[in-house]
Image (cartoon, helix red, strand yellow):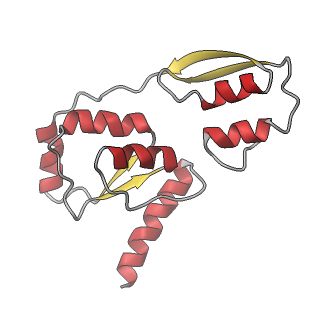
């Protein structure tokens, strides 16, 4: 089964077409994640076990190091692939970080975009489907349009 929408709500919607009553479902996922899938499956009658399979952590990089890349003109776009990547980036950069106008933000999907906006970042690039290949294609298309001008 492949959901029509590549977000948790899309998974729940796709599985709602199946008989989930009494089904036993294992949800391996990030240690910190939204509960959309487990809650949606429980609502459909499934018994759900959630198991943390990985955690996203701060890279330990320092803001000064990352700002040097930006100041040297070596950063054109910052990509975020989950809300936790936004949170970890902002934890490193600090509350007073101001994104330079020339640096663009690309987000893999609407949940990540919402977190970026909540963090005070403007989102310049987002696409469907919400997968890495789609994100890369959207970045290429964005910069291709700029080179056509």
Q: Nearer the viewer, residue 81 or 18?
A: 18
Image quadrant where one finds the N terminus:
top right
Q: Is residue 13 above or below residue 121?
A: above
Residue 75: x and y in percent read 24, 56
Left or right of 2, for residue 134: left
Q: Is residue 16 above or below residue 58?
A: below
Q: Nearer the viewer, residue 127 or 134?
A: 127
Q: Nearer the viewer, residue 127 or 72?
A: 127
Q: Identify the residue shown where x is 49% and y is 55%.
A: 135
Q: Residue at the far right: name it.
A: 19
Q: Residue at the far bottom: name it.
A: 149
Residue 60: x and y in percent read 23, 27
Q: Quadrant of residue 64?
A: top left
Left or right of 46, for residue 33: left
Q: Quadrant of residue 140?
A: bottom left
Q: Residue at the far front: name it.
A: 43
Q: Identify the residue shown where x is 62% and y is 38%.
A: 8
Q: Identify the residue shown where x is 17% and y is 53%.
A: 70
Left or right of 5, for residue 57: left
Q: Is residue 17 above or below residue 4?
A: above
Q: Quadrant of residue 12?
A: top right
Image quadrant where one finds the C terminus:
bottom left
Q: Nearer the viewer, residue 146 or 98?
A: 98
Q: Identify the residue shown where x is 45% and y is 44%.
A: 112
Residue 105: x and y in percent read 34, 55
Left or right of 6, for residue 126: left
Number of residue marks:
0
Residue 19: x and y in percent read 88, 29
């Amino acid at each position: 089964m492949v959901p029509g929408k590549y977000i948790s709500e899309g998974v729940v919607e796709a599985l709602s077409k199946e008989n989930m009553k009494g089904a036993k479902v294992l949800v391996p996922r990030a240690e910190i994640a939204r509960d959309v899938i487990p809650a949606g499956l429980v609502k459909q009658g499934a018994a759900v076990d959630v198991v943390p399979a990985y955690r996203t952590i701060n890279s330990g990089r320092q803001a000064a190091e990352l700002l040097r890349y930006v100041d040297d003109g070596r950063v054109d776009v910052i990509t975020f692939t989950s809300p936790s990547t936004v949170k970890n980036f902002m934890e490193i950069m600090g509350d007073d970080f101001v994104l330079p106008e020339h640096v663009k933000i690309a987000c893999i999907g609407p949940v990540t975009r919402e977190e970026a906006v909540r963090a005070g970042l403007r989102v310049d690039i987002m696409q469907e489907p919400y997968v890495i290949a789609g994100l890369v294609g959207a970045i290429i298309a964005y910069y291709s349009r700029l080179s056509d001008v």
